[in-house]
Amino acid sequence: MADLRTMRTVSGARTAQIDEGLRAHMNKVYGTMSVGLLLTALVAWAFGSSPALMSLLYNFETGGPNILGWIVMFLPLLMVFGFGAAINRLSAAGAQLYFFVYASVMGLSLAWIFMAFTGISIASTFLVTSIAFAGLSLWGYTTKRDISAWGSFLIMGLIGLIVASIVNIFLASSGLQFAISVIGVLIFAGLTAYDTQKLKVDYIQHAQAMDSEWLGKSAIIGALSLYLDFINLFMFLLQFLGDRR
C-alpha cells in the first residue's frame, strides 16, 4: 500500500513537472516567434518606406522586381527547406540565430506591401491577424479533440497553394489570386490550430521520454511553424482587408 502511494506521489510530481515545463516551453515558443515577427516588421518597414532601399530590390521603370528582388522573393522558401535539413547539425543557439536571420530575410521579401497598401490598412490587418491567430492557437492548445488527422489534408492543400501562387506570379490572374487568398486563409487558420496542438503533444511525449536534445531545439522549431502560420495568414487577409495605394 505504501509503495502504491509512493508511486502515485512520484507520478503526480512528474506530471506537475511536465505541465510546468510545457508552460515554459510554450512561452518560449511564443516569445521567439514574437521577436521574429518584430524583426520582419522592422526590416519590411525600413525598406518599404524608403524608395532608395527599395530600388535595390525593385525596378521602378518596369514595375517589377530586379534580379536581387527575385532572389529575395524565393530565398525564404529555400531557407525553410535548408533549416529542415540543417536542424540536426545546429545547436540550439545556432537554430535560434538561423530563425532570426530567416525572419529578417522574410522582411525583405515583404517590403513591397508598404508600396502597395496604405500603412493604416497594414496595421489594421496585422491587428485582425493577431486576434484571429491568438484565438485559433488557444483553441488548438486547449481543445480535447484530436485534430492530428487534419495534418495530411492541410499539407496537401499547402503544396497546391504554393504551386498555384508561383504559377500566378507569371499569369497575374485576379480571379486565381482571389481563390488563392480564400483557400490560403482557411488552410493557415487550420494550420495554426493544428501546429499548436502538435507542439503541445510533441513536447509531452519527448518530456516523458526525457529527450533533452530534442527539447533544446524544439522551441525554435515550434516558433518557426507558428511564425509561418501567422505571416501567411496575415498576407492572405491583407488581400481582402488592405487598401491599395
Image (tube, helix red, strand yellow):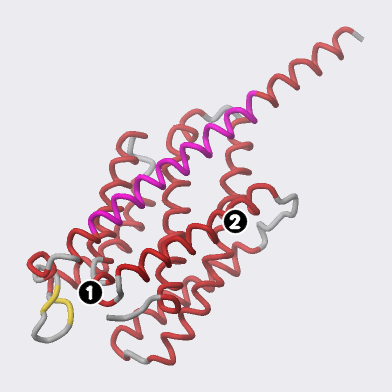
Image height of 14 relative to 242, above or below: above
Q: Secondary structure at mark 1?
A: helix
Q: Nearer the viewer, residue 240 or 27?
A: 240
Total numbered circles = 2
What residue is pinned by disc 1?
115
Residue type indicated by callout 2: Gly
Residue 199 at x, y percent in the picture = 56, 46
Q: Identify the image quadrant of the N terminus.
A: top right
Q: Identify the image quadrant of the C terminus.
A: bottom left
What residue is pinned by disc 2?
135
The segment highlighted magenta reads 17-43
Circle 2 packing at 10 Å, graded few (<14), some (14-19), many (20+), is some
Residue 37 at x, y percent in the picture = 36, 52
Q: Would you say residue 33 sits in the magenta stretch?
A: yes
What is the chief secondary structure element of the magenta stretch?
A: helix
First reached walking from the N terminus: tag 1 or tag 2: 1
Which residue corresponds to the image point at 57% horizontal and 29% vertical from the top-left? 21
Hey, which quadrant is residue 167 in on the image?
A: bottom left
Hey, which quadrant is residue 13 in on the image?
A: top right
Which residue corresponds to the image point at 63% horizontal and 44% vertical from the top-left? 201
Along the horizontal axis of the image, is 188 left or right of 82?
Answer: right
